[in-house]
Image (spheres, rainbow, N blue to C red):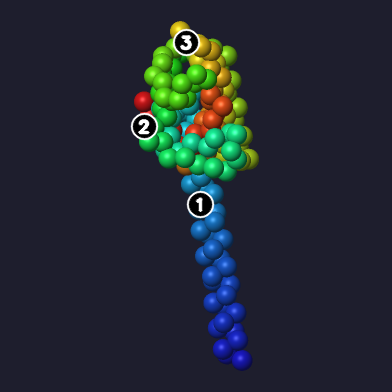
Amino acid sequence: MGLVIVLNCTAQTHKEKRAERDELRKSEQRNDFESISSLIHSRNFVFKSGTSENKQVSNMYEKQEHGKSVIRINGSLVRITGLNSSEWWKNTSGKIDTWDFTENPEELTYSISFIAHTPESNTAILIKIFSDKTAIAQFGGREFRGKVTRN
C-alpha cells in the first residue's frame, strides 16, 4: 500500500512540474510577443530568410543558392533583396505605402502588409511574425521563412 501512495505522489509531482513548465513557457512567449511589438512599431527592423517555398509547387522547399531574401525596413523606406515578378534575385529600394499592422494576442502573432513603391514596380509584401521572432514573408509570388531582427 505504501508503494501505491509513493507512486501516486510521484505522478502528481510530475504533472505539477509539467504544468509549471507549460505556464512558464507560455509566460515567456507572451513576454516575447510584447517585446516584438516595440520592434515592429519602430519600423526599424530586418527580415532575413533562409529558405523559400514556391507557391506553385506546394510543400517544396528550395535552398537559396545566391544568398538570402532580405527586407530592410527603416521608417517609410524599404530595401528588398529577393524576388520580383521578372527576375529571381534583385536589389531594389523604395518607399512604403499603405502600412497595415494587425496584432493577434491569441496566436501570439503580428501581421504587417504594405506596398513597396520602387522605380521598377510596386510590390505587395506580407510579413507574419511569431513570438520567437521567426517570420514568414510573402512577396513576388513566393513565401520566405526566416527571422526578424533589429535594423
- Please tell me whether mark 3 sits on a helix, a strand or a loop: loop
* Residue beneath disc 3: 120
Amino acid type, residue under disc 1 in the picture: Arg
Mark 2 surroundings within 10 Å by alpha-carbon count, few (fewer than 14), some (14 through 19), many (20 or more): few
- Residue at the image point whose x is 49% and y is 36% from the top: 52
**Image x and y of residue 148, in percent:** 43, 33
* Residue beneath disc 2: 66
Q: Nearer the viewer, residue 118 or 57?
A: 57
Amino acid type, residue under disc 2 in the picture: His
**Image x and y of residue 114, in percent:** 55, 19
| Residue 1 visible (yes or no) | yes
Mark 1 surroundings within 10 Å by alpha-carbon count, few (fewer than 14), some (14 through 19), many (20 or more): few
**Image x and y of residue 44, in percent:** 41, 22
* Residue beneath disc 1: 25
Q: Is residue 15 left or right of residue 48?
A: right
Q: 67 above or below 72?
A: below
Disc 2 + disc 1, Cβ < 8 Å: no
Quadrant in which the N terminus appears = bottom right
Q: Which of the 4 image quarters holds residue 75?
A: top left
